Amino acid sequence: MSRHLLFDRIDEPGLNTIGVYERRGGYSAMRKALQMPPEAIIEEIKQSAIRGRGGAGFQMGQKASFLPKGEMAKYLVCNADESEPGTFKDRELMQKSPHTLVEGIIITTYATGIHRAFIYIRGEYQLQADILDQAVAEARSAGYLGENILGSGHSLELVVHRGAGAYICGEETGLLDSLEGKRGNPRLKPPFPAIEGLYAGPTLVNNVETLGTVPTIINMGGAEYAKIGTQGSTGTKLISVSGDVQRPGNYEIELGMPSREIIYGLCGGPRDGRSVKMWFPGGSSSPVLLESDLDLAYDFDTMAKAGSMLGSGAIIVVDDSHTALEVMQKVVKFYAHESCGKCVPCREGTNWTLKMIERIEAGESTPMDLDILASAQSQIIGHCLCVLGDAMAMPVGSIVEKFRDELAEEIEAARERANSLAYATA
Amino acid sequence: MPRPERKLISLTIDGREVQAVEGTMLVDAARAADVEIPYFCYEPKLGAPVGACRMCLVEIEGIPKLQTSCSTPVRDGMVVNTTVERVKEAQNSIVEFLLVNHPLDCPVCDKGGECPLQDITFGWGKGRTRVIEPKRHFVKPLALSPLIAIDRERCILCYRCVRFSQEIAEDWQLIFTERGAHTFVGTHDGHPYVAPFSGNIIELCPVGALTSRPYRFRARPWDVEGSGGVCTLCPSQCNVEFTVRDDKVTRVLARENPGVDDGWLCDKGRFAYQAIHVDERITTPLVRGADGELRPAGWDEALEAAGALAEHRGRAAALIGGQASNEEAFLLARLLREGLGSGDIDSRLGAAGELDLNLMRALAAPALQASVSDLEFAHIVLVLGTEPIDDSPILDLRIRKGVRRNGVKLAIASARPSALDHNAKLAIRFAPGGEAEFLESLEWALGTPGSGETHELAALLRDGGEEVVILWGESLSAPARATLLRIADRLGLAERQGAGLLEVPLGTNARGIREAGALPGAGPGYGEASPGRSAAQIAAAAAAGEIGALHLFQIDPLRELPDRDGWERALAGAKLVVAHAATLTDGLARHADVIFPAESGAEKDGTVVHPDGRLQRLRSAIRRPGEVRAGWQVLADLAKRVGLDTGVLTAGMAFRQLIAAVPFYEGLTLEAIGGRGLRWPETEAAAAMPAPGPLAAAAGASATPAASGPRAEANGHLLAGTYRSIWAASEVEISPALRFAVAEQVVELSPQDADRLGIEDGAAVRVAQNGTRLRGRAAIRSGVPAGTAFLAAGIAEESANALTEPLVEVSKL
């Protein structure tokens, strides 16, 4: 069932301005939170059991509690890089209701004793970055940012930083390096950012949607929020549905909703006469699921059990007008292009996989090459410095596994084509 | 700063219980237990691991994913498997991935035979590849610099060279460009990677991507032998391994010694070996004929001619250069004192005056000596009147390491801006020649509250932590040294572990040569000796005809000492000039009557002493070229000619005589010195170091706050200081590979003075003083205080050694 918390009357004109936002009750959660002891806020977030909305699905309250206590140079970084193909939910939230994010950041920094926060937004989101800049300026004029916010003793500087367009800068440690002015490459973990992050200080890195949900949690109370959704996946989730559906776009759903209801109910399913061939439940890096998986509940645990993941909540639907090879090629091309090159299995693995697929297309492969292709994917998974390599290998591995016969046919067909072409030109 | 504690824990590797120091990286603990885990990117010298190559993945029980053993510190009770199937598979796959783009041109690759990629592919790879796709291509090889060739196709992007540039040398020149499989190593705008330590990346490279241009295609690993030695080109005395092929040094590699060099070399040490085998090298004795020409001569003839020293008994003087060994210095001093009845011998370079033996003893006192590794762990390091990058380059890296990794607080007090200024908490400038004044004000500030940078430094030294190391330059004047000693006393450095003084001398083996007794009025072991003239007094006396013979052991005073004109007159005034030299520098070419060919550092057998008191052994790595004979042998033969039987028939006998003569070397043997050296101040015999007598009255009591800042310019003249560039060495000038680096007169000016004088950066300038004129190139350096200029000394042409006065006039040419 679709339920609106973040997207509640999201299209109301002027919601991106502080006036409309406050008239609708905005910043009341902040006022409430600033009266609470910081630990109590963390407690509420823990009780809400909200899992990170960026992709990894780690519990936010737990992550925040890893941060060392006390006065020191600590940072909050909001990950607004939203670079996973198929994901565009944060864009809408930031564009239409930027103050939700600003308010969430103020509350979270107060709860964790952080006085410097950054929103790292992808460079392509120019409009959204401008809107955020405006929102930050408004919040500052209203006294919600800066020194001693509303007399609470909490001070916060918030900076909107524009990225330069690399997928890897959405990986939290790559993002931190980029923010520090370095080449955006992921760092070795541990140390995790909560211990040693930005400028070697303890750093909390959270997704836009996660932070944007914090005001709701404060308003409702953590326990109340936790009643929404399923036990392991509480709350609502913004999802981006794209691909072969009749009504693509962003939706807010209650976690646990049957997948079929999302794809067919909300989005109208594929065009008439077409059927779902496969779907990515959580962005292009999630292993694909099949038509037969459509009755699974859309939540973190069920998706994981089905061998895939909920990821950032980006559902990409592929109907039967596309070949498996075509889908695989698109995925591989993207990740080979975006691999940062730091670690060997990802750099060489993505590049080799791409070359293997180009070879298939050129008609120079045999079905036996599928074994090599699959084996290369399993050699990448779990061996890389960050998850970018896995992000290619997991969906590609699943496509080879689930569409092996079709791929073998495509290989043979490509070979035939190449041969006949060779005869024709001979 | 406390050294890390070493607590032993036990863990299980491949079913065997092993012990390791807690916190050690797993890969190191495994190696110590004879379990080899392959890796490419890991190199502890480079700091924190990056985990990029993924070659060292192992299974740790309790953790689902394989872990990189290079970045996993060992914990008690850890159970590690390095040979199980999934680890083997991971290793196979990393090798396969690495070779996706590697050209496998091993048969024509310099690295072949000593290549980690080759070894690991054989050891941990599957032996066959499934990759038939085309590999990436680059133009190759390209010159990354005049010294280094880069082959980007071979590069496995392990990060080592880039980390070296960014985190060790901190020159920030090497970077990665592009992304993913297109990534390559380069510099920001493609400029050559020229930096004092660039050659280290050749050794760091685990494949044949970075190769030495001078060494390229010269030899295969099975054609060569490695021979351990010590670099004698500067006081750092880095431990090296000479790569020898057919009795020629073809390459120099680092031989890691944490107490000396930390495993790094500067480019001078790495590439100036070429000077050993060039035509400019003197390989036969030379004797000046009646026609005034120097001509090759036989040994008998040369020794006969030099034997004329005996005619100048009581009127002979000797100078000795920094590259002499302890034994050579000892024998030269014997020859002069016992054979020729003269005490006029000096080994101090720079403008040292009369020797204050008590002061020298006090500064060399064992309890006050800091070691090189103390620089890395001290709370405070004060660099005083020396520029490590030029004077002892490898210490520059050690100081950077201390600051970067251990939080050492660094302070610089010098006339000339330092390359380390950016790493320092405090950088104080005093006027050239103003170090005594500065130290007096520092001494005063230590006991008097106040504000200003001198007080800040005083507070740092006094309250910044127990372990204070002061790295000071030999060019400090006697009054400055006396004050330094009082400051050290006041700070109690002698009593504190890890604290003390460390001198950066001007000559490679200055300390050993002094300890061997090549000083005016001081014999072996800083003992008393008959009085003698200092270098400057020798010059004056020789010019005045009071000295008949000059014996120059591996030194050309026109090149190495100040007051070039004074020495010109001295050399002209002496009736006999006997020299030992490897190359024919200007002063010797014009004035020496007899020149004995000198050994290079790769040929000598003997010992040297590191500035921190570490005796190190020089071992002959190659046969001496041509007619070159051992220095000790030539000196012993020459002594015989003047009627002194030294009793020295072998290098070992010379060493034993030295040990017997220096009380605090007692009991030392060549075996004990070994390949890593031995610090005598840490031995029991150190107690035999003679105690300093009473020092000259302390000026401290009457000291007042002196103006420590640079003085304002006087009448448009600039106060001149000198510096000796890392490249100012005759070995550099004759090494073909280093031609691009040869030091020239670079006049460092402040932006203000440059502006006032209308001089642009890089412009040709003239420096004038009392009729002396030097030409040079201007370098505008923001750290140079207005009113001062810094001039290069020790260079072949246009050298500041010609200057005698503090003020110079600089003008556009």
Image (cartoon, coloured by chain):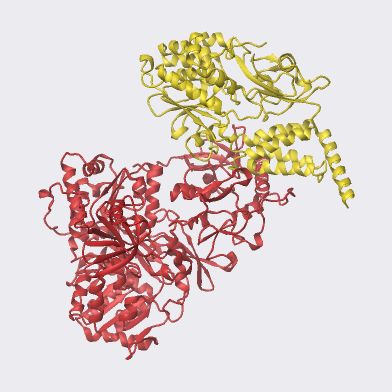
Most extreme residue toward the bottom, as rendered? B290
Q: As displayed, is residue B479 above or below residue B72? A: below
Most extreme residue toward the front, as rendered? B758
**Looking at this view, is B238 or A408 the one in front?**
A408
Q: Position of residue B67 (x, y in %)?
A: 58, 38
Name the residue located 59 percent from the left edge and 62 percent from the top edge. Answer: B110
Colour in which chain B is drawn: red
Name the residue located 49 percent from the left edge and 34 percent from the top edge. Answer: A179
Is B334 on the left-hand or right-hand side of A153?
left
Most extreme residue toward the left, as rendered? B702
Q: As displayed, is residue B770 above or below residue B206? A: below
Colour in which chain A is drawn: yellow
Is B278 on the left-hand or right-hand side of A315?
left
Q: Position of residue B663 (x, y in %)?
A: 26, 64
Quarter of the image where the N terminus of chain B is located? top left
Is any atom of residue B631 visible in this view?
A: yes
Is B586 on the left-hand or right-hand side of B153?
left
**Looking at this view, is B593 or A166 the one in front?**
A166
Name the residue located 23 percent from the left edge and 69 percent from the top edge. Answer: B519
Q: Position of residue B85 (x, y in %)?
A: 68, 41
Q: Position of residue B675 (x, y in %)?
A: 43, 61
Q: As displayed, is residue B450 above or below residue B801? A: above
